[in-house]
Image (cartoon, rainbow, N blue to C red):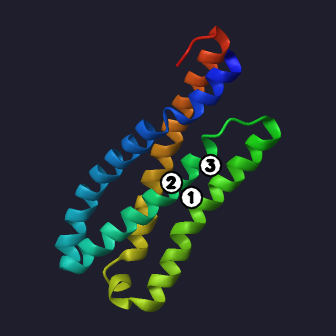
Amino acid sequence: MIEQATTNLSWTPLLPRVSKLAAVELLALAMIGMVAYWSHGTQGLVAALIAASVCWLGAVMALIVTSRPADARQAISMVYAAVLLRGAFPLVVAVVLRSGYPSLVAAGLMIYIILFYLVTLASETFFSVIHLSMTRHVQRHGLDY
């Protein structure tokens, strides 16, 4: 029963965690987007929107990787994969956009990627810690989640 609950537990709360992450990202986009628009106009707003989207997608990929149930050895590998996805995806997109769209870089794209990366990292970590503590509570008490 606990094994079945653990399997269901891992995938069930993924959508709410992704939704909460999106809500935090939209809130950050509203604040950072205003500054981007005031400082660089429409190009700044587009740069902030791209940065928010890219960082959110990286964080969602990391959440998907770490949502699977795993033993201790697999868990470490999943954390490494999540760190790689969360960090490398925005970095690769930044490098590609830097070479192809210098106007976005001039509008602050790299700064916005760093800002949104920090927002998504903090948010995703917070939601993952809550999920992990709930998982342990459920496993410890044999509850169905």
Mark identifier at residue 65: 3
Which label number is shown at residue 51? Answer: none
Residue at which label 2 appears: 59
Instruction: Name the residue located 57 percent from the left edge and 48 percent from the top edge.
Output: 64
The residue pinned by badge 1 equals 86
Looking at marks 2 and 3 on the same chain, the residue that comes earlier in the sequence is marked by 2
Q: Residue at x 43, y 57 (%)?
A: 56
Q: CA distance from mark 3 to mark 1?
A: 10 Å
Circles 2, 3 touching at the beta carbon (< 8 Å): no
How many angstroms separate mark 2 from mark 3 (CA)?
A: 10 Å
Q: Position of residue 88 (x, y in %)?
A: 60, 67
Where is residue 106 shown, x and y percent of the image?
34, 85
**Element under label 2?**
helix
Q: Is residue 101 above or below residue 54?
A: below
Is 140 positioned to the left or the right of 145 in the image?
right
Are discs 3 and 1 less than 8 Å apart at CB?
no
Q: Secondary structure at mark 3?
A: helix
Amino acid type for the residue under numbered disc 1: Arg
Secondary structure, mark 1, is helix
Give the mark nearest the N terminus, 3 or 1: 3
Q: Is residue 40 left or right of residue 94?
A: left
Amino acid bearing label 3: Val
Q: Residues within 10 Å of mark 2 (few under 14, many from 20)?
A: many
Disc 2 vs disc 1: Cβ atoms closer than 8 Å? yes
Report which quarter residue 29 is drawn in: bottom left
